[in-house]
Image: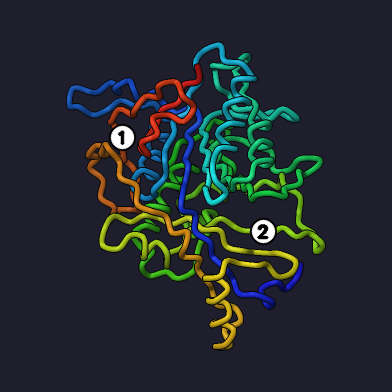
């Protein structure tokens, strides 16, 4: 490991655009069943995907896409869709892919999605496609995943990270015990909490760092080693995808908190040529003798996204971030795609059902 941080200042580059995909989302065109008092009836899976949907709708400028495939979809449908989606975005976009469900496999790691033959959707291929694209990608996987592969993949054009569920809480017979310390629940609870306490923070935090102090969590999240380590002779800059409280303050102003995801340089062999505004900040920091000053690339600050529909009233106070029980998901109906891969193109939630 080279002492790169002694050579240049830390540069924090915000993502102006976020694309959030919920794989295996519930059908948001169909109203939920309700109890006589109007309380929506949801399965555990529906509760989890709604928690994630509402988190990104409330606290980011993300374009949210519900990904559902019709029955009798093929492996080619899966591959074609993801190759198009993961290669159509600009390099300053952050792609976040969330999945909750069953998964497994030795060399054919797959998600359990009934629409496909044998209910197998090739997650291995999805991660490989992301790794070969030019857009940074974060996988948030509330499912089983192996933490190592025999031959790590090389990664030259972008940064791909996988953050996955650790060991689930279970009884002595191996039965899973549902609790609020699960991966999705803890992820939402802590990022909701971050959206309240960010005004007291300065240091950017990665998602695992944001989850670290949570005593309710059953186990630490995993960061599987699927990508090859960088070497000194490599020219690629390695970033960690984080949330910046400083830029969150700037982006939120007096309005609702909008979390700003950034890439913070964590290692790189040698110096890198940054855009002129960043180089000016670095030069000024060096003149002040601040060898490790943080320089923010303000040219890439995200723009607020206005949603055409509002989240349903859930009876949840953002000041009560310690208790996520009783948080219900959105009850609104998403716009349905007209069959085009891009959805409705209006910047709101879109539902893609491959034809």
Reply above or below: 162 against 27.
Answer: below
In the orientation shown, which residue stands out farthest toward the left?
37
Q: Residues within 10 Å of mark 2 (few under 14, many from 20)?
A: many
In the image, residue 220 lies at what x, y percent? 57, 50
- In the picture provided, is 289 more to the left or to the right than 267? left
Seen from this angle, which residue lies furthest top? 72
Residue sitting at x 54%, y 16%: 115
The residue sitting at 36% across, 36% down in the picture is: 346
User: Where is 84 relative to 255, above or below?
Assistant: above
Q: Residue 238 has which mark?
A: 2
Q: Is residue 212 left or right of residue 247?
A: right
Where residue 123 sits: x, y (%)?
63, 31
Q: Position of residue 341 (x, y in %)?
A: 49, 27
Expressed as whole percent of the image width and height from the top left, the position of residue 68 reads: 48, 24
| Residue 98 visible in this rendered orientation of the protein | yes
**Depth check, front residue: 85 or 327:** 85
Of labels 1 and 2, earlier in sequence is 2
Residue at the bottom extreme of this rendering: 288
The residue drawn where x is 54% and y is 17% is 114
Q: How is the image coloured?
A: rainbow
Instruction: Indicate the secondary structure of the residue bearing disc 1.
Output: loop
Q: Where does label 1 land, which residue? A: 330
Residue 287 shown left or right of residue 226 in the figure: left
Pointer 1 with pointer 2, Cβ within 8 A = no
């Amino acid at each position: 490991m080279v002492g790169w941080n002694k050579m240049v200042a830390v540069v924090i580059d915000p993502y102006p655009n976020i694309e959030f995909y919920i794989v295996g989302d519930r059908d948001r065109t169909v109203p939920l069943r309700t109890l006589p008092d109007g309380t929506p009836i949801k399965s555990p899976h529906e509760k989890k995907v709604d928690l994630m949907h509402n988190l990104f709708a409330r606290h980011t400028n993300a374009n949210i896409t519900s990904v559902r495939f019709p029955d009798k979809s093929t492996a080619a449908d899966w591959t074609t869709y993801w190759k198009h989606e993961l290669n159509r975005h600009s390099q300053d976009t952050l792609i976040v892919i969330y999945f909750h469900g069953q998964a497994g496999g030795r060399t054919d790691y797959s998600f359990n999605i009934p629409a496909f033959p044998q209910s197998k959707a090739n997650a291995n291929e999805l991660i490989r496609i992301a790794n070969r694209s030019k857009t940074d990608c974060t996988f948030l996987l509330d499912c089983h995943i192996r933490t190592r592969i025999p031959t790590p993949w090389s990664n030259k054009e972008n940064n791909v990270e996988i953050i996955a569920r650790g060991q689930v809480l279970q009884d002595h017979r191996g039965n899973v015990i549902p609790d609020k310390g699960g991966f999705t629940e803890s992820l939402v609870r802590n990022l909701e909490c971050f959206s309240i306490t960010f005004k007291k923070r300065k240091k950017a935090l990665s998602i695992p760092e944001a989850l670290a102090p949570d005593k309710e969590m059953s186990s630490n999240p995993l960061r599987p080693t699927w990508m090859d380590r960088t070497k000194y002779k490599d020219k690629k800059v390695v970033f960690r995808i984080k949330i910046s409280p400083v830029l969150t303050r700037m982006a939120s102003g007096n309005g609702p908190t909008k979390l700003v995801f950034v890439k913070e340089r964590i290692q790189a062999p040698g110096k890198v040529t940054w855009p002129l505004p960043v180089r000016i900040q670095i030069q000024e920091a060096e003149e002040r003798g601040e060898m490790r000053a943080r320089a923010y690339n303000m040219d890439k600050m995200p723009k607020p996204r206005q949603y055409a529909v509002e989240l349903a009233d859930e009876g949840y106070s953002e000041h009560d971030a310690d208790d996520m029980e009783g948080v219900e998901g959105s009850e609104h109906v998403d716009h349905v795609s007209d069959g085009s891969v891009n959805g409705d193109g209006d910047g709101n939630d879109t539902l893609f059902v491959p034809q």
